[in-house]
Amino acid sequence: MGLFDRIGRVLRANINDLVNKAEDPEKILEQSIIDMQEDLIQLRQAVASAIASQKKSQQQYNTAQNEANKWQQRAQLALQKGDENLAREALQRKKAQADSATTIKVSLEQQTAQVDTLKKNLMQLEGKISEAKTKKDMLKARMQAAKAQENLQNTVSNIGTSSSLAAFDRMEEKVLQMEARSQAAYEIGGTGIEEQFAALEGSDVDDELAAMKAQLTGASPNQAALPQGTTDSSHSASAVDDDLEQLRRELDKS
């Protein structure tokens, strides 16, 4: 491959790439419809011109046919009057007009076929333009929907990587840490409801035990017990023995 061929291919590739990037689907669709409508105008003009030529040829054909018929009648009249030369001249004129009519007829048939073809092409182009307009509107709607979807996707992607969600994550982590510290502080320094009920139940047992001691010693339940190692002058060793004997009797009864 020659150097110039390679350079030419690179240039064409770059140009095609620029054209592809510069193409706006909506603008291209609009321009395509405009181009098709311009072609439709030119085709209508061509059809109108062909029809005008067809009508002109038809008039020429009719005129040639009428002239041929007229000279035919004159030839008959001249022959009836006995003027053979005049009849021959009329027949020559009649033949010229007939030949002209035959030639015009061939051209007229070609023009008629051309007009029919142009009319069919005109109808097809009109149908294609109508279809293209409908398809253009559909493509524009699809393109707008695609752009909206693309913009939405880009927005969602940007939100997913933005600092906003990261901030929410950090705040959630902080809240979780605060909750954990609060729970730990409560468990360490606070008294739970179970412990409170246990304390209440424990106080009842202590009261009952104090009542039993008071019953054994004969003292009031609210009277405070003497500290261990102290003596009371109102009690003697015999009183202690009496209390011990009473406790034994009560135990025996039970």
Image: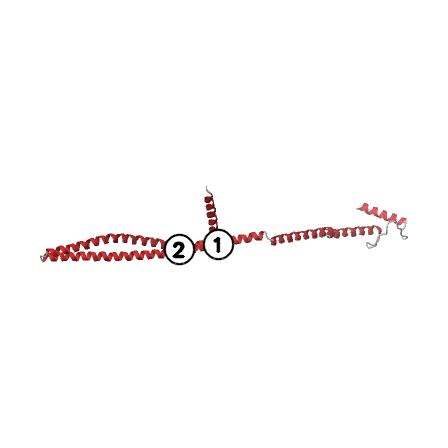
What label does residue 35 carry, if any?
2
Number of marks in picture: 2
Identify the residue at the far top of this view.
1
Amino acid type indicated by mark 1:
Ala
Task: Pinpoint residue 159: horizontal percent, then vertical percent.
Answer: 57, 53
For marks 2 and 1 on the same chain, the one whose residue lies earlier in the sequence: 2
Q: Residue at x 40, y 54 (%)?
A: 132
What label does residue 145 carry, if any?
1
Identify the residue at the far left of this view.
82
Spatial separation of the CA atoms under disc 2 and disc 1: 26 Å
Task: Pinpoint residue 69: horizontal percent, then vertical percent.
Answer: 17, 56
Task: Pinpoint residue 151: horizontal percent, then vertical percent.
Answer: 52, 54
Task: Pinpoint residue 193: horizontal percent, then vertical percent.
Answer: 71, 52
179 to the left or right of 75: right
Q: Secondary structure at mark 2?
A: helix
Q: Quadrant of residue 35?
A: bottom left
210 to the left or right of 65: right
Identify the residue at the far front of this view.
3
Q: Residues within 10 Å of mark 2 (few under 14, many from 20)?
A: few
Q: Residue at x 84, y 51 (%)?
A: 217
Q: Nearer the viewer, mark 2 or mark 1?
A: 2
Q: Residue at x 78, y 51 (%)?
A: 206
80 to the left or right of 165: left
Amino acid type indicated by mark 2:
Asp
Q: Residues within 10 Å of mark 1 (few under 14, many from 20)?
A: few
What label does residue 114 carry, if any?
none
